[in-house]
Image (spheres, rainbow, N blue to C red):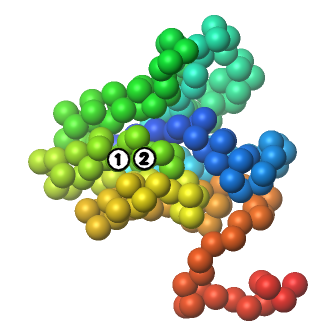
Amino acid sequence: MTEPSGRRTFVLVDGENIDATLGGSVLGRRPHPEERPRWERVTAHVEQAWGQQVTGLFFLNASHGTLPTSFVQALLAMDYRPVPLSGGADEKVVDIGIQRTLTALLERDDADVVLASHDADFAPQLASLLGHDAPERRVGLLGFREFTSTHLADLVDDGLELFDLEYDVRAFNAELPRVRIIPLDDFDPTYFLR
């Protein structure tokens, strides 16, 4: 466990976006249990990488009036704070909740943030966090690099740090069938010769 340093990192998880990208873009089907991210690895990775306490917030759409009780219990067991939101059929409640949380973090000069999402809707809030008057603030993005919105990827030049959910965090128990650009320095031909 990392010693408290006065700063902490908030990991904001857009579970809908990660799940949709995993199922629709990576696998082309609904993920099997072993193909789902191990969310406790995410907070452990960020804590180790940035050397400070981490608080995980997992945003859920509860607009239908029900909670996925077993999943909420699992999140609580992993020390995440579930954020079940509800709203009208025309509202993207998870996105709105995350946007409001990112905006609220602008007022905190003792907090860093990692967002787990690929969604361009968060680019303005992340850009504000990167450009805010807290030059020591760290801002990260977690997901599958090849599916990250260009609006988010463009923020790397402003200091946005990228974490790949599979390759950096190792959040999965099974290898995913991904096709990605491989830097020549990282190319291992034996991987393709199996």
Residue 24 in percent (x, y) is at 71, 47
Residue 193 in percent (x, y) is at 84, 89
Q: Residue at x 77, y 54 (%)?
A: 27
Secondary structure found at label 2 = helix
Specify the label residue 123 is tagged with.
1
Q: Residue furthest top?
A: 65
Dividing the picture into quarters, in which one does residue 62 lie?
Answer: top right
Q: On screen, 139 above or below 10? A: below
Q: Amino acid at mark 1?
A: Ala
Q: Residue furthest right?
A: 194
Residue 8 seen in the figure:
yes
Specify the label residue 42 is tagged with.
none
Q: Residue furthest front?
A: 90
Q: Which residue is mark 2?
A: 120
Q: On screen, 181 above or below 95? A: below
Q: Residue at x 57, y 50 (%)?
A: 42
Q: Residue at x 22, y 37 (%)?
A: 106
Q: On screen, 72 above or below 58? A: above
Disc 2 from disc 1: Cα separation = 5 Å
Q: Is residue 126 left or right of residue 41?
A: left
Quadrant of the image for the C terminus?
Answer: bottom right
Disc 2 vs disc 1: Cβ atoms closer than 8 Å?
Answer: yes
Q: Residue furthest left?
A: 133
Q: Is residue 159 left or right of residue 42?
A: left
Dividing the picture into quarters, in which one does residue 185 lie?
Answer: bottom right
Which residue is at the front of the view, 176 or 170?
Answer: 176
Residue 58 in percent (x, y) is at 54, 32
Q: Amino acid at mark 2?
A: Ala
